[in-house]
Image (cartoon, rainbow, N blue to C red):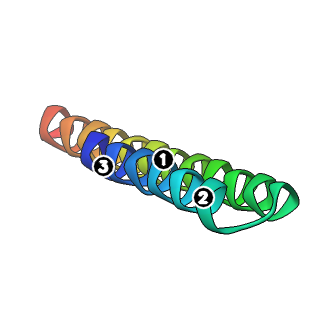
Amino acid sequence: MLKNMLMAAALGVLVVGTGCHRNTRDSAENDAERAVDKTKDAAEEAGDKIEDTAEEAGDKIEDATDN
């Protein structure tokens, strides 16, 4: 989870850095927006995975205590 978020942030920094040197200002802004969107998506996916894992653990605990 944290690894994915850090990778997305690093990718975003690289995209922004490359965009600023090679593209126009508008293109660099678009690259930055895409990088932010990718970072948000990665964070949401990580959050969903954590939630799913917590629910599965809760279900297993309930099953164990029911027996």
Which amino acid, by three-letter code, is at mark 2? His
Give the mark nearest the N terminus, 1 or 3.
1
Residue 30 at x, y percent in the picture: 79, 60
Residue highlighted by disc 1: 13
Q: Secondary structure at mark 2?
A: helix
Q: Residues within 10 Å of mark 3 (few under 14, many from 20)?
A: few
Above or below 15: residue 52 = above
Task: Estimate the spatial distance between the alpha carbons at disc 2 and disc 3, rounded to whole Å.
Answer: 47 Å
Tag in front: 2 or 3: 2
Residue highlighted by disc 2: 21
Task: Estimate the spatial distance between the alpha carbons at disc 2 and disc 1, rounded to whole Å.
Answer: 13 Å
- What label sits on residue 34 in the rendered view? none
Residue 33 at x, y percent in the picture: 75, 52
Q: Residues within 10 Å of mark 2 (few under 14, many from 20)?
A: few
Name the residue nearer the viewer: 38 or 44.
38
Tag in front: 1 or 3: 1
- Asked if marks 1 and 3 touch (Cβ < 8 Å), the reply is no
Name the residue nearer the viewer: 19 or 65.
19
Above or below 18: residue 12 = above
Tag in front: 2 or 1: 2
Q: Quadrant of residue 34?
A: bottom right
Which amino acid, by three-letter code, is at mark 1? Val
Task: Estimate the spatial distance between the alpha carbons at disc 1 and disc 3, rounded to whole Å.
Answer: 35 Å
In the picture provided, is 49 more to the left or to the right than 56?
Answer: right
In the picture provided, is 8 more to the left or to the right than 41?
Answer: left
Q: Secondary structure at mark 1?
A: helix
Residue highlighted by disc 3: 56
Say which residue appears at 33% left-offset and 38% top-offset. Answer: 54
Which amino acid, by three-letter code, is at mark 3? Glu
Q: Quadrant of residue 41?
A: bottom right
